Amino acid sequence: MAVTFDGGVIIGSDSRATRGGEEVSSKTINKLVQVHQRIFCCMAGSLADAQAVLKTASFQLNLHSVQMEAPPRVIAAASLLRKLCYHNKDELQAGFITAGWDPQKGPQVYVVSLGGMLISQPFTIAGSGSTYIYGYTDAKYRPHMTREEGLQFVTNALALAMGRDNVSGGVAHLVVITEEGAEHVVIPGNKLPKFHDE
Amino acid sequence: MLEEQGPEWMSEEVKTGTTIIAVEFDGGVVLGSDSRVSAGASVVNRVMNKLSPLHDRIYCALSGSAADAQTIAETVNYQLDVHSMELGEDPLVCSAATLVKNISYQYKEELSAHLIVGGWDRRGGGQVYATLSGLLTRQPFALGGSGSSYVYGYLDAEYRAGAGRTDTQRLVVDTLSLAMSRDGSSGGVAYLVTIDGDGVEEKVFLGNELPTFYDQ
C-alpha cells in the first residue's frame, strides 16, 4: 500500500512469498523496489513477472533521466510500468504501486493495474490482503496527515491485513519518501500493533 | 423455440450477496444487515430485511442463497417454539444456534446459506454465534456475506470488549456503510436490531442517513 501525507509518501508491504498458498517460500522478502532516489515501487501479482518488468522499467527510467538531465518524475516511472504492462498484458500478471516525491508535484501515488490502467490516488492498497482492509483504510484515511499519523495508518493497516490473510505476513517494510530522501523502516512481527483478539 | 426466454435475472439464482454483522456488547447484542438481494447482475429487492426473528430475544442474520437461508430460519423458528413450550421458558441463544448448526451441517452439501445467530438470554447475556459450514462457535463479533471481507480489518481495529449499547450501534452502522460502499452485492438501507434484557429495538438507516467517509 502507499499513502501520501503532508510533505511525502509512505509505501509499505508485508514480506511473505508463498507457493500455491500452502508453503511460505520466503518470510522476509522485500517487495519494495527502489527505481530511483525518491521513487519506489511495490509489486503485486506474480513476483517473477513483476521483478522482470521492474528491471526493464528501472533501466529505461535511468536512460530517460540521463537524456532529460534531471531526476525523473514519479509519473514517468509509473508510465513506463504501465506501457510494459499494457503492451504485454497477455503474457504478464503483474500490478504495481508507484510512490515517490518530485519537485514538480510533490508526493504522489500511482497505481498500475493488471491490464495496464494508470491512475493517481491519494492512497491505495493492493494485493490479496487488501480486501480485508478496504473498510479500515476508507474510514481512517485523512488528507494532509503528518508523518507520524501516516506511519501509524500504514502500520495498522498492514498489521490488520496480515492478521486476516494467510498469504500475507512476516515483517512490515515501510519506506518514507520526502524531499530529503528515502528512509527504510522495518517493523518485525512481534512489534506490530496488536488488536482485540491477540 | 421450445421456451420463451425471459429477462436474464428470471433464470439466475436469487442470492443475498450481502453484508451481515453481529456484535456483542455489555448486556446485549446488535445485529446489522444491508438490504440488497441480487439475481446475477440485477437487484431484485433493494429493501429486504435480512434480520429474521427466531424467538422473542433471538434473531438471525441471513446470507448466501435467499431461499436456503429463509427456509433454515423458518424451520428453526418452528423448532424453537416447540422447544420453548417443552421447557416452559425462553430458550437459550446457544440452543437456537445449535438448531441452526444442525441443519447447516446435516445438509451442508445441498444448502448454501450462512446464518449468524445473535440474542440475549438470562443465563449468558448477549451472545453471538457463527454457524458457517456447519460449525458452531461463539465469538465476540461475527461477519458474513460477500461484503464482510472488506471490513474485517475495520472491525478488528475498532471492536472493544465491554463497549456500551450506543457505541456498538454506531460501530455496526459504520461497518455496514463501509462494506456497502465497496461491495457491489451489498447496498440499499441498513437494518439494525438491538437485543437486550428489556426487549428488542429495530431501526432502519436510509441511504442518506448512513455515515460517509473521506471520498463521499
Image (spheres, coloured by chain):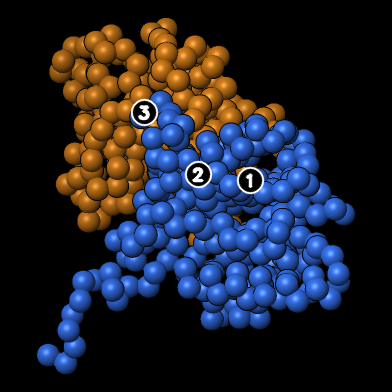
Task: Identify the chain of the residue marked 1, using the numbered disc in the image.
Answer: B
Q: Which residue is mark 1?
A: B201
- What's the amino acid at mark 2? Val
In the image, is A152 to the left or to the right of A45? Answer: right
Of labels 3 and 2, the one closer to you: 2
The residue sitting at 44% across, 57% down in the picture is: B48
State whether residue B115 is above or below residue A197: below
Residue at disc 1, secondary structure = strand
**Hey, which residue is sitting farthest bottom in the picture?**
B2
Q: Nearer the viewer, residue B108 or B172?
A: B172
Q: Which residue is mark 2?
A: B204
Work out how far the residue at label 1 is from the one at label 3, CA to CA, in angstroms.
31 Å
In the image, is A80 to the left or to the right of B119? Answer: left
Which mark identifies residue B215? 3
Residue at disc 2, secondary structure = strand
Which tint was used for chain B? Answer: blue
Q: Are marks 1 and 3 in contact (CB under 8 Å)?
A: no
**In the rendered image, what is the letter of the chain coloured orange?**
A
CA neighbours of label 2 inside 10 A, class few (<14), some (14 to 19), many (20+) = some
Q: Is any atom of residue B209 visible in this view?
A: yes
- What's the amino acid at mark 3? Asp
**Split into 4 quadrants, where in the image is the N terminus of chain A?**
top left
